Image: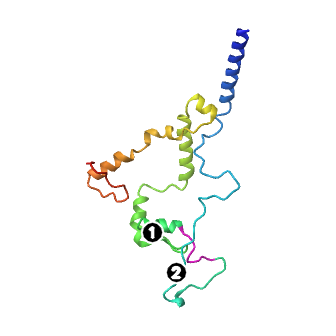
Amino acid sequence: MTAARLVLAIAGASLLVLAGCGGWRDKPPHLMNLRSSTNGPDEFSIVPPKPLEMPEDLAALPEPTPGGENLTDPRPKDDAVLALGGTPRTASESVPAADGALLSHAARNGIAADIRPTLAAEDVDHRRKNNGRLLERLFGTNVYFRAYRKQALDQQLELERWRAAGAGTPSAPPRQLGER
């Protein structure tokens, strides 16, 4: 009776291992899911409008156009450009002259038009090479952080390195009492 149970246990374990190995090379490794899989609202796509303000001169307001932009419409890309010290551009103009030096420095090694698909393919290849252990593949667990562990930056060591070099770190928490 015990020999039959042992044979059944080995056969069951073998089936689980074979089932876990089937087809995993065909699918790209999955990243963390940042998209909602439900039919409800996506909380990351909701951007509150800007507050209403009374302009100093009502005659300076643009003519309203159906389907056009409103002054209180959220413009997160423009807000990010402003936060980084740039000048947001309108749809009809090219890069502002004040941002020309920044653009030429960013493009000094060339600009690849297909950068997103290239990076996605390189990422899939890297994660396939670091695809996790057998049970992680079998149960489909996320191995993203372990795959990129060697490329991770230690925030605290980097903060101390910049502070030791004399750089200002206004967005970092202040040192605790007793720290160097």
Q: Position of residue 88 (x, y in %)?
A: 48, 71
Q: Residues within 10 Å of mark 2 (few under 14, many from 20)?
A: few
Q: Is residue 142 above or below residue 88?
A: above
Q: Is residue 16 above or below residue 125?
A: above
**Residue 66 left/right relative to 157:** right
Q: Is residue 22 above or below residue 64?
A: above
Q: Secondary structure at mark 2?
A: loop
Q: Residue furthest front?
A: 177
Amino acid at circle 2: Glu
Taking the spot 56% from the left edge, 75% from the top edge, the residue there is: 72
Real-space Cα separation, disc 2 to disc 1, in angstroms: 19 Å
Taking the spot 39% from the left edge, 47% from the top edge, the residue there is: 155
Magenta residues span: 68-75
Residue 140: image tag: none
Q: Position of residue 109 (x, y in %)?
A: 42, 54
Tell me which corner region of the image, top left, top right, bottom left or bottom right, holds residue 142.
Answer: top right
Of 44 and 94, the residue lying toward us: 44
Closer to the chain start, of discs 2 and 1, is 2
Q: Position of residue 70 (x, y in %)?
A: 59, 77
Secondary structure predominantly adopted by residues drawn in magenta: loop
Name the residue carrying label 1. 82
Q: Secondary structure at mark 1?
A: helix
Quarter of the image with the N terminus is top right
Taking the spot 29% from the left edge, 52% from the top edge, the residue there is: 163
Amino acid at circle 1: Leu
Q: Position of residue 64 (x, y in %)?
A: 62, 83
Tell me, yes or no, whether the highlighted magenta stretch contains residue 70: yes
Name the residue carrying label 2. 53
